[in-house]
Amino acid sequence: MATERQRTAPGLLAALHQARLRWGNPLEEPALAELSAAFALPPGEIAATASFYHFFQTPPARYQIHFIDHVVDHHAGIEALCNRLCAAFAIQPGERTADAHLFVGWTACAGLSDQAPAAIVNGRPLPALTPERIDAIIDAIRAQIPVAEWPAEWFAVANPVYRRGPLLTWLHATPAAAVLEQLSAREPEAILQAVADAGLRGRGGAGFPTATKWRFCRETADPTRYLICNADEGEPGTFKDRLLLTHYPDHLFAGMTLAARAIGAQTAMLYLRYEYQYLLPKLEAARERILAAQSQLPPSERITLEIALGAGAYVCGEESALIESLEGKPGRPRVRPPFPVTSGYLGQPTVVNNVETLVAVAAIVGNGPQWWRSMGTPDSSGPKLFCVSGDVARPGLYEFPYGVALGDLITAARPLGTPYAIQVSGPSGTLLPATPEQLARPLAFEALPCNGTVMVFDERRDPVAIVRHFARFFAHESCGFCTPCRVGTQLIAKTFAKIAAGYATRFDLERLAPALEAMRLASNCGFGLSAGNPVRDLIAYFRPRLDAHLQPHDFLPAFSLDAELAATRRLTGRDDTHAHLAQFEQPEAAR
Ligand SMILES: Cc1cc2nc3c(=O)[nH]c(=O)nc-3n(C[C@H](O)[C@H](O)[C@H](O)COP(=O)(O)O)c2cc1C
Ligand code: SF4
């Protein structure tokens, strides 16, 4: 009988990317037959894996444009820009032109929150869109100019840094060569001890002590181990890793090599989100440099470095889903235990660390643990990269020590109006009102946990609409493996669609409560645990704003009753009052 372990197909994702370029989406015979032979998997299983990933669904077209469906982009007018492009070619979002030249669709936040509104064309970023830029794009498509020949400035992703601290200063000042020298100097135990003494905690969100995770892995009996760098950066509003991948890839690969050494891994892999594929040439060059720098080491101490590209699935940022994806499977989080540190990639002990964590490792080895500990709080040591976006004059990157007050970070980004609501740590985190007491809270694992992401919304924004965006995001991205999350995320999204349609009542919120509870208690991974957070916070902090959207009735249907009769009205030619239905019954008291 085939076990899970035998069904792995490392490299399948890369092969699917190749096949997509050659045969188009969705994959059919003979592409499936070819992959089936190469990976010894039934064609149906390959098709099922491909169908899990968003960017393997896009129909083939010379120009595939995905507009960013993210709350910050919506506030910056993305919908009008999308409609402008679609109207020029007489299509709707999600459609392809009759000549199959152009496809226009939507996609989740692509790590460009500081440069909203944005889109992606054939996998390349189109930041800071304007109506004029859209018109120029329309002209380029009409003139059939290949995307490779579009002006380079259309694709230029800036990485504005508004506050540099000791970490960015060190990265900026330290040539890669100096980092590489550390590679030959360090014994595994010394690297591990430095990271332990620094008190480094994971920068991917959960804040697990890095050295503890490493030690669990290192102490396993199995000598074949893996180190994986998580560059999926899928949490909406997050773009801090983008800066590190763009400007400091050598430091990252050096950090990966040091970490691999510390845990006794022979291979270190970088899992890069699809939307960052434009960085591949830079990353490949850095990988080559670090590999070359290792040539001075005895072969047994050299670390193999690999890069894998994702294909559009937020849940693949969850470490066990990421491992499944690397194994050529749908990115569904595993049932744990066993945890990756004991049974991860190909069933071997595996450590997954975030990009910023691994860059921190290089900095700690370079500067010593005391340097790191001298910053931050006792429980959350070191500097932290924060990415601020939304209604601020200076959306971009800020380095502060952990423990900085939320309000100080926001002030540094120069709010455009009076901040009203703040989303801390992305939609999985916390939606807070911008009250003095909330703004005074320190960003730290022991106080207000934050993966670095802060989105600022001023009084022009409706928190209910913000939560509706997040609800749609979670409903779209749930992997569907466990019932509370698969169903619960849909229930939340439907409830918010009903609220937006003006048909929701208090009853709809009450009905949601058990689903939220089930998601929180019975989900298989962190996704389901946190997908209810936006609603929870809306109810806790913005109740009057939510209530203002609710109808005073006991219950209302979620759809328009009158619209349901439209087809019959057309068929019968009737339009009398009996051929119509009222949506609202007068409440008892008002009769
Ligand atoms: C739904 C979900 C999405 C996640 N996305 C990311 C991500 O994009 N990047 C990341 O580093 N960690 C992400 N994580 C956390 C990872 O599972 C893991 O904890 C992290 O990569 C560990 O690295 P660290 O200890 O260095 O933080 C996500 C977790 C969940 C539950
Ligand atoms: S909680 Fe959601 S994302 Fe996580 S395994 Fe269950 S269905 Fe998948």
Image: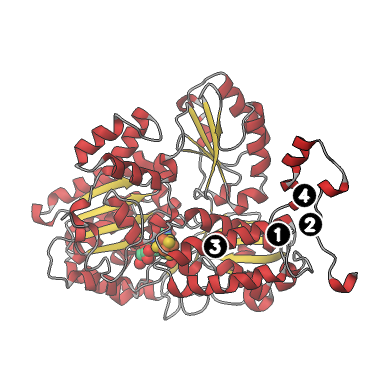
Q: Is the N terminus in the top left, top right, bottom left or bottom right quadrant?
A: bottom left
Q: Amino acid at mark 1?
A: Pro
User: Could you say whether the residue bearing mark 2 is in a helix, strand or loop?
Assistant: loop
Q: From this view, report whether residue 434 is shown above or below residue 82.
A: below
Which residue is found at the position 57% from the left and 48% from the top? Answer: 69
Q: Amino acid at mark 3?
A: Pro
Q: Earlier in the sequence, mark 4 or mark 3?
A: 3
> Ligand 2 is located in which of the four quadrants?
bottom left
Ligand 2: does it lie within 8 Å of the C-beta at label 4?
A: no
Residue 513 versus residue 542: which sits nearer the camera?
513
Q: Earlier in the sequence, mark 3 or mark 2?
A: 3
Query: Are the two marked residues, 4 and 2, in contact with CB atoms closer than 8 angstroms?
Result: yes
In the image, which is nearer the foreground, mark 4 or mark 3?
A: 4
The mark total stands at 4
User: Could you say whether the residue bearing mark 1 is in a helix, strand or loop?
Assistant: loop
Q: Residue furthest top?
A: 143
Which residue is tagged 1? 557
Q: Earlier in the sequence, mark 1 or mark 4?
A: 1
Within-10-Å neighbours for mark 3: few <14, some 14–19, many 20+: many
Q: Amino acid at mark 2?
A: Gln
Specify the color scheme.
secondary structure
Q: Which mark is residue 427?
A: 3
Residue 453 versus residue 21: which sits nearer the camera?
21
Which residue is found at the position 74% from the left and 68% from the top? Answer: 545
Q: Is the C terminus in the top left, top right, bottom left or bottom right quadrant?
A: bottom right
Within-10-Å neighbours for mark 4: few <14, some 14–19, many 20+: few
CA distance for labels 2 and 1: 8 Å
Residue 301 versus residue 111: which sits nearer the camera?
111
556 horizontally vs 62: left or right: right
Question: Residue 235: x and y, percent?
Answer: 48, 58
Which residue is tagged 4? 562
CA distance for labels 4 and 3: 36 Å
